[in-house]
Image (cartoon, rainbow, N blue to C red):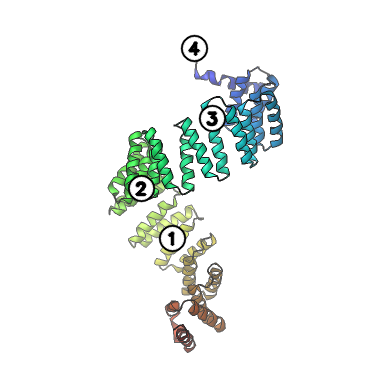
Amino acid sequence: MHYSHEDENFPLTRFESMLKTNDILFFDSGEFENIIHHYLENGKIALAKKAIKLGLAQHPTSVNLRLFQVEILVIENKFSEADDILAMLHDVEPNNEEIYIQKANVLSKQDKHEEAINTLLIAVDISSTPEDDSDLFALIGMEYLFLDQFENAVIYFKKCLETDNTDYSALHNIVYCYDFLNQNDEAITYLNNFLDKNPYCEVAWHQLGRQYFNIKEYSKANAAFDFAIISDDTFVNAYLEKGKVLEKLKLYDEAIENYKITLAIDEPTSFALLRIGHCYEKIGQEELALQFFKKTVEEDVLLDKGWIAITKFYMKRLNYQKALHYINKAVNIDGENVLYWKLFATVNKRLNFLEEAEQGYKRALELGNYELETWIDRSDILTALGEYNAAIFNLIQAAEFYPENPEIEYRLGGLYFKTHESDKGRFHLKNGLRIDFDYNFIISELFPRLMERPMIRTIIAESKRISN
């Protein structure tokens, strides 16, 4: 009998032409199930609902079509309607595990995870095949993850792998749980035992390498990634991770080699291009470093690490004009990136473009970068620009985040004296001296003329006498 791939899609084609013509055609219940499954897989909920309605009109006793109906009701958060149908189905087929799976799904969506687990355990009791068990164990593991019960989750994901040793999502979940529990040693022991039985599992070798990397056992990590590559020489992530290890071992040429292999196997990734650039920079190949940094931003224009690498490359070589050119480009692409604005401010400051530098710090603060250094740098630039009131306002805001901070207090003291508010100046200067006398150099550095005033010299001398 001649059979082609088109035959698989034939019921779907017939169904869709029926919807256009309003003719009613007959499909068996299995065909309806395939049609509904196709629509759900592709997120076409409205068409899935139509198919369920027509399917149930032709096959009113089909349990599987009813289960699809339940699935849709769960998507629409209609839990009580879903429960009613499941109760009815349970009366008809009390040993159908799929009914329990859907019941657990309804409970899970309502955050009743303990009840969902108990329901799934009933399904395990009545399931007939190990493959079904593996799926059920995975669902139970996920429910335990929702409850943040990582130890219990590990137990069930391990059961998945005992049933099916190629269930890599279960393997990833086990390692995720160990990572969350900060149990590197347990993860390493488990992965080594798993690899004793499955020595060519590249995913397990890769995960083992990552565990060794986390505890800084770089030579063991390197060996594990080698085994991952032996098991599958097209495994891009293993080469990337091996490159990171080689960088830690300062073997930059070998790291470049591994990163370049990933470019040959697959589409170039901005991560690999950036790392190659950094490696070339470490071995003094400046032109090649810059070439790869530029390739990084061509590959992914939104990767901030790429733009920052180019800007810092030029800053290290004191070529601030070039640095400014690239950080301006970055800011134009993504004006909401705090790191860009901080770098923008720094470069402008080096070029003595104080207004622009101040704008950069201001934007960084507006975007939520409340580091002390940002407040202080902005204040010092406003002071240099003679914007004393704006500098004071900036420091008062900073003091909300950093109360009792000597760097803020000395600056406020100096600024209030500059704006002829001597009482406030005295208050903040004394505060600064009380918190940390050694920071008094701030006054002579930022406000050298103030040190000529006898009153200020007296306050500092008195404070020194008291602290001694």
Please name the amino acid that badge 2 sits on: Lys
Can you give x and y, in whole percent of width and height, for residue 286 in the image? 30, 54
In primary-sequence order, the first of circles 4 and 3 is 4
Q: In this figure, which residue is indicated by the disc labeled 3?
A: 133
Please name the amino acid that badge 4 sits on: His
Q: In this figure, which residue is indicated by the disc labeled 4?
A: 2
Question: What label sits on residue 458 in the rendered view?
Answer: none
- Is residue 407 at least partly visible in the picture? yes
Q: Nearer the viewer, mark 2 or mark 3?
A: 3
Q: Nearer the viewer, mark 4 or mark 3?
A: 3
- Is residue 267 at least partly visible in the picture? no
> In terms of image quadrants, where is residue 15?
top right
Of residues 5 and 331, the one drawn nearer to the viewer in this rendering: 5
Q: Nearer the viewer, mark 1 or mark 3?
A: 3
Can you give x and y, in whole percent of width and height, for residue 241 in the image? 37, 44
Q: In this figure, which residue is indicated by the disc labeled 1?
A: 343
Q: Nearer the viewer, mark 4 or mark 2?
A: 2
Q: CA distance from mark 2 to mark 3?
A: 39 Å
Residue 203, relative to residue 450: is it above or below?
Answer: above
In primary-sequence order, the first of circles 4 and 2 is 4
In primary-sequence order, the first of circles 1 and 3 is 3
Please name the residue shown 56% across and 72% down the image: 396
Q: Classify 10 Å Cα crowding around label 2: few (below 14), some (14-19), many (20 and above).
A: many
